[in-house]
Amino acid sequence: MSKEVVIHAENISKQYRLGQVGTGTLSHDLKRWWALARGREDPYMKVGMDNDRTQKATSEYAWALRDVNFEIYKGDTLGIIGKNGAGKSTLLKLLSRVTSPTTGQIKVKGRIASLLEVGTGFHPELTGRENIFMNGAIMGMTKKEIKGKFDEIVDFAGVELYIDTPVKRYSSGMYVRLAFGVAAHLEPEILIVDEVLAVGDAEFQKKCLGKMGDVASHGRTIIFVSHNMQAVQSLCKSTMYMKAGKVIDVGPTDKVINNYLSREVKNCLEQRWTLDVDAPGNDKIRVLSAELIPQTPDNSNIIDVNTPFEFRFEFYNGVDNANINLSLVLNTMSGVCIFNVGTPAAALSKGIHSSTLKVPGKLLNDDVYTISLYFVKDTAAMQYVIHDLLTFEVVDEQRQGAWFGKWVGAVRPTLDFSLK
């Protein structure tokens, strides 16, 4: 039995004029009209840069999206990933009909609820109660249907005390809580969520992911944009990877995320700073250097799953006789914590100190990793934290060209496991 297509995008593109609001000048609009009147192609469809923010402008026009094609089926949970400026938010605005494509067409079957940015669809002068009823009415719901969901929305958002207060007085966290509650509870056939969950706290993010999972389990369609790879992995069955306004890859979430990380993440195996010039930190701690050293016979920087390596750090302690311990947290780029290891506390004199962590081979799986360092005093008082200090990739050279895919699991240690 074939699945029902709820969104069909065919050759959609979106062009913007750099530095201008609107379509451009009157002369440009007249040229467009004259070309179309003679049955010719729009002259400005032939020009324009790709959406690469690192390039110098070579044209008055830029393509935020270029020739995007895809289909989304009923009940799908699709993640959309990519670096900032990849065109993800522009695509969601087209799907939500906030703006229209320059070329191509989008066919949508079903009622859409969108959460594109904090406060989307809310009138700042109206109260939370009034905005709930207004949004429900816009989605085509009756007053009775909205009343039936009202208490559930308010309870989810946790804003009962302020429900009759104009939303312009809400904090950004309250805003997004209520907005998500409205979008998720008014029973849309298609729910579109942009990277707005970053505004909420960890508890609320977990609550939102749980609610989106519940929505998906009832056969509704979800499109979710996020930079949190772990959230995308836990929620979405399939994922679209975008870059410079184009679709690079679409497929199973694990495969697409690995493709994205291998293309976009660069190894950073060494960092060095000068104490009085640019060393990150504060008056208590300054990080001077961080280095990953693979233990390979040929001094190669390639880290295989079998390669042991060392982390070496140097830092300045600005408080004499401070009882300090270091914690190192190793995460995958998708946000999975592999381990959190700490040194014993030591009374350190004021000055420069160093630390080394040895990691054995045959422990880590092939993936991209990042490390963070936490400097803690008296096992409780945080002195300084530095995230994403080093980034590195562990590869499985034996797997290259093999018939099987990625080894399952966060780690792959060699253990005594026998069969008789």
Image: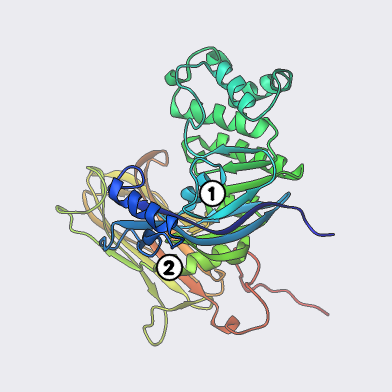
Q: Between disc 1 and disc 2, whose residue precedes?
A: 1
- Tell me which residue sits at (75%, 44%) in the image: 217
The percent position of residue 143, horizontal first and vertical second, equals 69, 18
The reply, left or right, for residue 21 in relation to residue 6 is: left
Amino acid type of the residue that numbered disc 2 sits on in the rendered structure:
Phe
The percent position of residue 369, horizontal first and vertical second, equals 47, 63
- Tell me which residue sits at (53%, 60%) in the image: 68
224 up-or-down from 413: above or below:
above
Query: Of the numbered discs in the image, which one, if any, rests on residue 88?
Result: none
Q: Nearer the viewer, mark 1 or mark 2?
A: 1
- Tell me which residue sits at (53%, 68%) in the image: 259
306 up-or-down from 343: above or below:
below
364 up-or-down from 195: above or below:
below
Frontmost residue, 313 versus 36: 36
Q: Quadrant of the rendered structure where residue 58 is?
A: bottom left
The percent position of residue 386, horizontal first and vertical second, equals 35, 50
User: Number of marks in the image?
Assistant: 2
Query: Of the numbered discs in the image, which one, if any, rests on residue 392?
Result: 2
Does the rendering let one see residue 17?
no
- Tell me which residue sits at (51%, 51%) in the image: 91
- Of helix, strand and loop, which one carries label 1? strand
- Of helix, strand and loop, which one carries label 2? strand
The reply, left or right, for residue 369 in relation to residue 389 is: right
Q: Residues within 10 Å of mark 1 (few under 14, many from 20)?
A: many
Does the rendering let one see residue 65?
yes
Quarter of the N terminus within the rendering: bottom right
Quarter of the C terminus within the rendering: bottom right
Q: Which residue is mark 1?
A: 225
Way the structure is coloured: rainbow
The reply, left or right, for residue 88 in relation to residue 374 is: right
Amino acid type of the residue that numbered disc 1 sits on in the rendered structure:
Val
